[in-house]
Amino acid sequence: MTRQRISVAKEFPTMQRICSGVIGFGSADTAWRRGRRLSVAGSLVVAFVASGCGTGMVAGPAPDYEVARALREKLSSATEGGDAKEESPQGTGWATLKGRFVFVGTPGAAKALVVDKDTQVCSKDGMKLYDRSLIVDESTKGLANVVLFLRNSSRVKNEVSTDPLVFDQKNCEFLTPVFAGRVGQPVDVKNSDPIGHNTNIAGASFNQLIPAGDSTIFTPGRETGLPVTVTCNIHPWMKAYAVFREDGYVAVTAADGSFTIPDLPAGEPLEFQVWHERSTGRSGAVSLERPELKWNAKGRFRIELKENEVKDLGVLEVSADAIRG
Amino acid sequence: MEYLTVNTLSVESGTCTRPSKLWEDFARAGCGRSRPGKTRAFSDAGEGETGDSRRLLRTTGQMTGLRGPSHGRDCRPATTGWWAGVLASLMLPLLGTGCGQTAAASYRLNLVESAKQQLKPEQEQQVANILAALFGTPDEPFAPAECGLDEAKLKLAAGPVRSDIVGRKNGLYREHCAHCHGVTGDGMGPTAAFLNPYPRDYRPGVFKFKSTERADKPTHADLVMVLRNGLAGSSMPSFALLSDAKIESLAEYVKYLSMRGEVELALMRAFFELDDEDQGKLPEDRDFLIDEIVMPVAESWQAAEDALIDVPEMPADIDMAASIAKGKELFYGNKANCVKCHGVTGLGDGQVNDYDDWNKVVVQAYKTVEGSLEQAGETSTWNMDADEAAEHRAELAWLDRYQRVLDGNALPPRTIRPRNLREGVYRGGMRPLDLYYRIHAGINGAPMPAAKGTVPPEDIWHIVNYIRSLPYDFNGTLGVDRPMMARDRL
């Protein structure tokens, strides 16, 4: 790919004029004054080069206005509905999906986090905090904190519960490294430490002070898509992920790598998204070699369940190719 | 001649072929001959039909006080011809630079996000086309009716600076805002890199200083207030000298750019959500573009007017000294925890290694690039098959472009500066009410968290009172115990 230089002209015509003026000044002048003026012009040129006349800005594509005009007309003339959507087939009844993720290979030792604030609590009695982005169970090799969620639910069995889920922090660590919730279901954001924290959920514009021993309620208002980060700005090493789904068909693998998603719509094609923090795939997508599930590079697989079926995917082996060890 | 050459050269090659064409048109229309690129085309122009235009040119020249160079060559035979040539050669660059000679302004694509989403060139092209369809160009803005934007106000703010009716000026955004905020509203105008804090990038649709709850958009009045008062302590000046109508139109235009930027982000993120059957192309129907992409953005802006923070009045009979003492306790205590970022001295020297949301995007992107490059460097390529090798090369090409995009299309990230509370300068306004808003809802986009829910309103008022006392916080002899010495004292 060639490196293109975008002129300021496009983005800022006046600037272009000034830039060209400066260059023009130097070259159009008479010889006896040129020396002095050139130095002035030169310093101006240098200033402009630094400011953006010549920075290595990568140029994006220019819009095709013919296409754009046609599209605008189409959008303004189309009445409600527009292109008819094909109805996806609906089945009846419910089913369960389960399985277990296992890490193949040797996970590297977890890095100790730099804890430099509130050490009387956060490093109490020489306690150390470790990076939790890869947790592999020693005996079962189970891979914890893999997220699975359904992408296309046509129907939902259970109503949104009003019982709050708990998201707690203690010893300057979020107790749930990867948290799954449902849109509309309240989350009780707690702080079990004797010091104050704040909980900052990216994308949700939720960032609240949680005083020592206190809690506050957060009710997610929209889906997250892939998991988003949860941080504490007071203690920058604190980090967790959260995923909120409209239909609640989401699971996070347990310490032994196992997961169960009950009450899934049966008799229709389902597509699941799989995510892990340390995935080598794009945006955390975990892709495995499972052709029978049509598992693709975006970390999605497809499956259809029969009514009342409890489908066990068995052991899903994740190699160091898919997740950084 | 000199000027013409200079002008032609200065216009980016390839992007602008108009000077010579303009010359031809001009020569054909005004002087009966066409000889592109030569001043002589005018100097030896014949009499007759060209006389009027030459007179006109001379008059224009006299009116504007323009003078020809004394060393004009081959200027005979007619002096009128010479004058016409000189004037034309002087006017051409003016026309060239001033009257539509530079390429029409265009919006910059959000390449940082596009690189993050690993969009292919044809996908970037699709986003650019859809955005042009939905929002037009900087010269001809447009917005879907669902956005509820006032087209007349947008027109006043958009386009190059110009005047169509005496006394009325258009192109207000480019006159007053674009040099910092950029034509696209990406906070990357030519002066942006020199400013600290950086100018706001409107595209994520996040604004700091507002009267609404944290997650909500600012109201129209909030934007107008920022325009009118400026942001104390930053480079954002007050535009109070502009008429109400102009400020209104600029506020509307900021909303327009912000909605456009949010739609752009939503479109770029939507590629990941596509199914395999879509073959990497976004659907271009109303259901998707308007209902799924534009509507949520438009609705969030329309909902702002109903999301005002409910501020209980500070009790009139409040004991100020006691309130300040209580506020101090909260400031240092575990409940409000202000001290962690604003520092034990209140000088804003607590937590200073954090980033705001705009800078964090760039910081995280650099981390991704560095991590992936490191990983790619460790990958052994010798035993790869053709497919794997191609994939590896594609990955490297992507990382290379990502890096260049971050270097060239983003400003170097800067850490936050928690406000120095000893100065009495507050970006979002110095009224007690403004400080209440900031503490209640936090500052959206910045690490400053909301106290709402865990700190009751009366305590927020105590903190406001304490903060307002901080610039005058003397408890010793003036000169010995000044605030600036606070750090040493503690």
Image (tube, grey):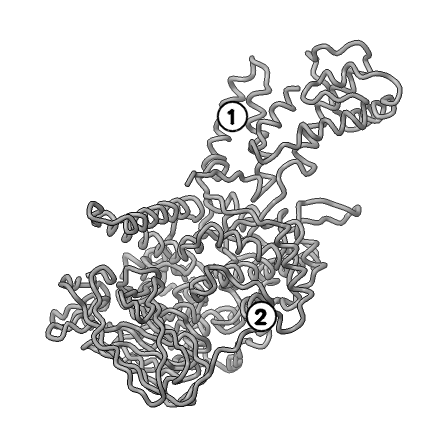
Which quadrant of the view contains residue A14? Answer: top right
Residue B217, above or below B79: below
Horizontal relation, residue A199 to residue B9: left or right? left
Depth order, front residue of B158/A255? A255
Say above or below: A318 vs B488.
Answer: below
Query: Where does residue A57 sit, x and y in percent of width and height?
Result: 46, 42
Judge whether B28 appears above or below B15 on screen.
above
Q: Could you tell me if the residues under marks 1 and 2 are in contact, i.e. CB atoms within 8 Å?
A: no
* Mark 2 surroundings within 10 Å by alpha-carbon count, few (fewer than 14), some (14 through 19), many (20 or more): some
Front disc: 1 or 2? 2
**Position of residue B445 measured from the top left corner of the image (x, y, whole percent):** 44, 64
Please state which amino acid type lies under the numbered disc 1.
Answer: Val
The local secondary structure at tag 1 comes to: helix
Is B224 left or right of B108, judged from the image as shown?
A: right
Residue of label 2? B287
Amino acid type, label 2: Asp
Q: Are marks 1 and 2 on the same chain?
A: no
Q: Which residue appears at 50% of the width and 55% of the height?
A: B200
Chain letter belonging to callout 1: A
Badge 1 crowding class, 10 Å Cα cut-off, few under 14, some 14 to 19, many 20 or more, is some
Query: Which quarter of the picture shows residue B454?
Result: bottom left
Q: Which residue is mark 1?
A: A40
Residue B397 in percent (x, y) is at 35, 46
> Which residue is depicted at the point 52% across and 43% down?
B190
Asked if B210 appears above or below B460 in the picture, the reply is above
Chain for numbered disc 2? B
In front: B19, or A168?
B19
